[in-house]
């Protein structure tokens, strides 16, 4: 009953104020949330930039320059093949001149087979189109087997 | 590399541009704060801002009723959402109720303005209240808002009678006030000339011209000031009875004219010589000589003191009603000419018809003057009573005995008169006092016209007064008794029909 | 990331339904139509969000939110003022948002567009001049063209060509000489606007020109020079054109001319002052006294009914939108696209500043629309188009 005395206000105005207050809160939420996300975005970007792919060599196959257990850190576009101007040169005759590449896209890494003669296997399936790499993916070229790790 | 440098430079410029735009945004935000903090109140309060009026318009202005519930004024919502005020009282009620037009409010409409525009709906801010609202939100959110209505003390039929009587051949200008002496309720208050407020918008310009010369808008019944003439003798009589011992037994010599030392001699009407008369008869024949003498004997202060009990010399305002200040002069005894004239309601004396009605009322009510009342009750939008006003005592102007003596004198006036009108009044067992006042009327251009006003002040029936009236007919002429006939007829109707 | 976007959709839905519900319950009979409109808008907005986030997650993720909130507020207020206009505005919103999304999906690499400099030049001149020759006058400005089935403001399209032209001609800035042609176009465009008495647009074109030239040239002296020319031009036109003198006069003394020339400004001020911090409630103000309340002056209605605080927050959202736009300019991969983004960002931001400043009587009033909120199909299309381009630019900036 004390309510009735305290809030001696036009009911219409009261309801109007309730609504307006609600709208103000929503806008505030949107603004503040956006600001928070934006600042995360700004600091988070560098982290994404630093995100690198790591390839763990399980089996070297015929590639004598590599060693089992060795690791590759990939940050930018990396090409694999027999030709000398590849980023990673593979000696295995099974391997084509420009066999496949791994490159970053939208914060992740993509593997693409370059129409190689013998193909590339991703998780034991022949790689037909560009595919995002995820952790624990296994790449096989001939007897070269590598496992994907993220940093 | 050039591209890189260019890129860097470009980005730097872009940041500069952004800073400028940020500054502009902040400027606007700052101005918004300034607007709110500094300018807002001032701007919203400017007269050009019609929002206050629009808000007022949301509430349908309340109606005004007569004492029996008959509608006198009400408002109608038009199709374009404006309100139209309909004055059913028309000419008879024009001045006392006033009008409401756009931003101008006058008369009773003005006095009642806050009440008529108040929406009494109060929302119950409790759980039950909200639940009720949910059942039918429209009834709360979209309800038609109405102001309070007011039940006045006026009697619609009586008012129209008074208005018609005042205009019926007998005179074109004047005022009538009728009161209930026991409660102070004002039963009728009319003015002539008048106008129909329903045509106000169209006729305003031409009416305004008439305002000063003919005074159509002013409620002269309460706000006018006139010399009451012989009706003032009631007060002089009362003062004499109270303050001069043995005045009732005294014999006066009335040889038609009172000689004074300073100022004008005071003649009787038509110079009539009354010879040796006692007070009662002097009152009945309205002897200026006798009452001038009494005034000189009493002295200005003393006489004014009695008048002041009725409200003279004071700024009066009654609930919802304003009255002009009546004047009772206080001439010293050496200014006997003026003093004598003031005793007969002439020099220096002025009163409104309402004031004189109050005089009659007080006497009729055995010396107890009740505060004039215009409003009986206030009703909320749903018809329930919000407030009821009770009669209040204004002042006791005389002890019962003296008042009753005056009462009998007034009855005697009527009974001993050979005038046809008075005979009719006697049949009603009425009492009263006639008066003829020499006054002047001031036009807008400053010129003064001398007029002779016809007054009557009285009440009926004598044993148990129901109604007290004061009638003044402007420029009614000497002794014509116009006011008396009107008053008699009015009181007759009232006592027979109410 | 997706999760957080849905969390942003929730408040938008709440806002939309809230606004329309507020309007609906105060009608004599609960207004179902309002709720239907709310529903339609929410569907559209959800669709836009999903498309942008799912398929084009590389670009700016905040624009689509701002670009939904502002029209929602606008359409709700328009619905309160005049439901049939609100429906038309919804249609324009649909067209606009579709344009926005289509631009991102359909357009190929924007760099391909940098070669059409002379096409843009012609387009600019054509649109700017159009109204002078075949236009009609509305609200004192001769900048509308009525083709029977549709009427539009050619200067709005002119703005787009203008920005594209300046971006393509300024990107290779080397010497002062290369500034001559763009300079002329800028002056010509402003000139036509002044001729057509659309002073607000003239100002916008001036600001866009100055900003883009400065961005491209980095030379402060050019900036000062253009300000100088602008100031001289402004002062000259003050003396030459009586209607400009009038504008300044009613800006300085709005109360004196309250019955005639400054009636609109004064009514706007009354409205905003009566609203207070929290407004008088949606539907409970008295906007009927404000002239042109559906387009240029809609801001006054918002301040009156929804309050100063709410309006302040809208201003913040406009600024955040500007920030995201300019960020795309900073991250753009080529000078051309960067300049494009600068031009459009400045265009939208200055429009906001100029009209709100004018309504508040902080600066003289000019007749331009409040982007995304004011009623106006041409305006909405132009803004959505610009934002679509910017979104595409942000999309392209991967690294």
Image (cartoon, rainbow, N blue to C red):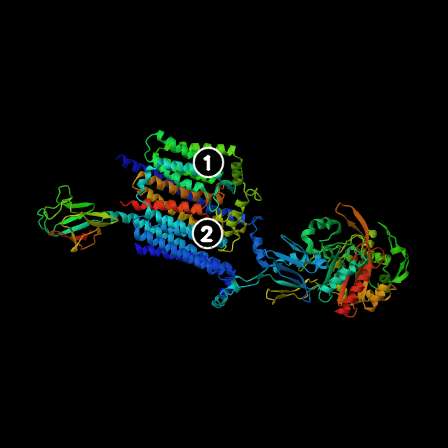
Locate the C terminus of chain B by quadrant. bottom right
| Disc 1: host chain | C
The picture places residue B72, in percent across and down from the top left corner, at 68, 62
The picture places residue C298, in percent across and down from the top left corner, at 48, 49
Q: Would residue C356 appear left or right of C389 to someone viewing this image?
A: right
Location of residue C352 by image quarter? top left
Locate the N terminus of chain B by quadrant. top left
User: Which of the two residues, A11 or A55, is positioned nearer the viewer here?
Assistant: A55
Task: Return the residue at label 2.
Answer: C88
The picture places residue C210, in percent across and down from the top left corner, at 39, 36
Secondary structure state at the residue bearing disc 1: helix
Secondary structure state at the residue bearing disc 2: helix
CA gap, disc 2 and disc 1: 29 Å
User: Which of the two residues, B356 or B116, is positioned nearer the viewer here?
Assistant: B116
Q: Earlier in the sequence, mark 2 or mark 1?
A: 2
Task: Return the residue at label 1.
Answer: C192
């Amino acid at each position: 009953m004390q309510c009735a005395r305290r809030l001696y206000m036009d009911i219409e105005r009261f309801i109007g104020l309730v609504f307006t207050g609600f709208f103000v809160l929503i806008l505030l939420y949107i603004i503040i949330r956006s600001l928070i996300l934006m600042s995360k975005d700004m600091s988070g970007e560098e982290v994404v930039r630093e995100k690198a792919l790591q390839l763990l060599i399980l089996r070297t196959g015929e590639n004598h320059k590599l060693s089992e257990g060795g690791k590759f850190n990939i940050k930018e576009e990396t090409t694999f093949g027999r030709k000398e101007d590849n980023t990673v040169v593979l000696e295995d005759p099974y391997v084509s001149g420009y066999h496949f590449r791994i490159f970053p896209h939208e914060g992740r890494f993509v593997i693409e087979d370059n129409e190689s003669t013998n193909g590339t296997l991703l998780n034991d399936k022949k790689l037909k189109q560009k595919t995002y790499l995820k952790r624990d993916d296994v790449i096989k070229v001939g007897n070269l087997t590598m496992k994907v790790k993220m940093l | 590399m050039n591209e890189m440098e260019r890129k860097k430079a470009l980005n730097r410029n872009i940041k500069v541009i952004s800073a400028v735009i940020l500054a502009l945004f902040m400027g606007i935000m700052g101005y918004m704060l300034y607007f709110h903090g500094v300018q807002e109140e001032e701007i919203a309060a400017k007269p050009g801002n019609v929002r206050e009026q629009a808000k007022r318009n949301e509430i349908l202005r309340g109606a005004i009723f007569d004492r029996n519930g008959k509608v006198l004024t009400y408002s109608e919502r038009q199709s374009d959402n404006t309100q139209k005020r309909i004055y059913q009282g028309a000419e008879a009620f024009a001045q006392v109720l006033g009008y409401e037009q756009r931003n101008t409010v006058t008369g009773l409409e003005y006095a009642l303005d806050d009440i008529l525009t108040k929406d009494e709906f109060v929302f119950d801010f409790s759980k039950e209240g909200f639940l009720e609202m949910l059942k039918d939100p429209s009834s709360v959110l979209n309800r038609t808002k109405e102001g309070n209505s007011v039940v006045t003390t006026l009697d619609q039929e009586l008012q129209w009678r008074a208005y018609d009587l005042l205009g019926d051949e007998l005179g074109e200008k004047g005022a009538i006030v009728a009161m209930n002496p026991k409660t102070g309720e004002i039963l009728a208050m009319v003015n002539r000339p008048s106008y129909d407020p329903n045509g106000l918008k169209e006729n305003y310009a031409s009416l305004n011209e008439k305002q000063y010369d003919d005074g159509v808008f002013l409620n002269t019944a309460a706000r006018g000031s006139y010399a009451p003439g012989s009706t003032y003798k009631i007060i002089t009589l009362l003062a004499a009875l109270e303050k001069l011992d043995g005045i009732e037994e005294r014999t006066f010599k009335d040889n038609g004219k009172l000689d004074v030392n300073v100022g004008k001699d005071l003649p009787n009407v038509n110079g009539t010589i009354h010879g040796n008369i006692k007070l009662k008869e002097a009152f009945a024949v309205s002897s200026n000589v006798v009452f001038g003498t009494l005034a000189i004997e009493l002295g200005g202060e003393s006489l004014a003191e009695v008048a002041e009990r009725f409200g003279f010399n004071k700024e009066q305002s009654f609930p919802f009603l304003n009255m002009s200040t009546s004047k009772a002069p206080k001439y010293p005894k050496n200014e006997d000419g003026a003093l004598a004239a003031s005793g007969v309601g002439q020099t220096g004396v002025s009163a409104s018809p309402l004031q004189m009605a109050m005089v009659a009322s007080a006497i009729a009510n055995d010396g107890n003057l009740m505060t004039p009342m215009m409003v009986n009750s206030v009703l909320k939008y749903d018809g329930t009573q919000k407030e009821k006003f009770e009669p209040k005592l204004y002042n006791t102007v005389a002890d019962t005995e003296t008042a009753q003596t005056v009462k009998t004198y007034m009855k005697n006036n009527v009974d001993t008169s050979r005038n046809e009108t008075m005979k009719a009044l006697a049949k009603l067992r009425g009492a009263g006092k006639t008066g003829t006042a020499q006054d002047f009327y001031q036009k807008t251009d400053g010129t003064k016209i001398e007029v002779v006003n016809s007054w009557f002040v009285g009440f009926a029936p004598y044993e148990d007064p129901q109604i007290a009236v004061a009638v003044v007919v402007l420029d009614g002429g000497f002794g014509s008794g116009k006011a008396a006939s009107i008053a008699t007829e009015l009181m007759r109707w009232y006592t027979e029909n109410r | 990331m997706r999760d957080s976007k849905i969390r942003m959709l929730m408040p938008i839905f709440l806002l939309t339904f809230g606004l329309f519900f507020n309007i609906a319950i105060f009608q004599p009979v609960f207004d179902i139509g309002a709720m239907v409109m709310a529903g339609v808008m929410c569907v559209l907005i959800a669709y836009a969000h999903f498309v942008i986030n799912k398929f084009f997650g590389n670009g700016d993720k905040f624009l689509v939110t701002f670009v939904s909130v502002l029209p929602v507020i606008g359409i709700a207020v328009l619905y309160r003022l005049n439901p049939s206009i609100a429906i038309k505005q919804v249609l324009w919103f649909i067209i606009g948002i579709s344009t926005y999304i289509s631009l991102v999906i359909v357009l190929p690499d924007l760099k391909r567009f940098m070669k059409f400099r002379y096409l843009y030049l012609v387009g600019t001149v054509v649109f700017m001049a159009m109204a002078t020759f075949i236009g009609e006058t509305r609200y004192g400005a001769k900048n509308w063209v009525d083709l029977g089935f549709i009427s539009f403001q050619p200067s709005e399209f002119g703005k787009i060509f203008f920005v594209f032209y300046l971006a393509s001609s300024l990107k290779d800035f080397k010497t002062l000489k290369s500034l001559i042609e763009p300079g002329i176009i800028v002056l010509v465009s402003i000139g036509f606007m002044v001729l057509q008495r659309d002073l607000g647009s003239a100002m916008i074109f001036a600001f866009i020109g100055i900003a883009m030239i400065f961005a491209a040239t980095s030379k402060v002296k050019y900036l000062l020079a253009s300000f100088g020319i602008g100031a001289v031009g402004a002062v000259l036109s003050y003396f030459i054109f009586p209607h400009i003198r009038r504008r300044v006069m009613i800006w300085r003394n709005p109360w004196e001319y309250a019955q005639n020339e400054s009636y609109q400004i004064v009514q706007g001020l009354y409205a905003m002052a009566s609203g207070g911090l929290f407004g008088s409630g949606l539907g409970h103000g008295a906007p009927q006294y404000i002239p042109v309340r559906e387009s240029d002056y809609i801001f006054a209605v918002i301040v009156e009914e929804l309050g100063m605080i709410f309006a302040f927050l809208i201003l913040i959202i406009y600024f955040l939108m500007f920030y995201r736009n300019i960020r795309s300019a900073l991250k753009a991969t080529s000078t051309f696209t960067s300049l494009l983004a600068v031009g459009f960002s400045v265009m939208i931001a200055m429009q906001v500043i100029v009209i709100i400043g004018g309504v508040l009587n902080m600066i003289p009033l000019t007749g331009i629309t409040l982007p995304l909120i004011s009623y106006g199909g041409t305006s909405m299309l132009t803004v959505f188009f610009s934002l679509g381009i910017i979104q595409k630019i942000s999309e392209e900036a991967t690294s």
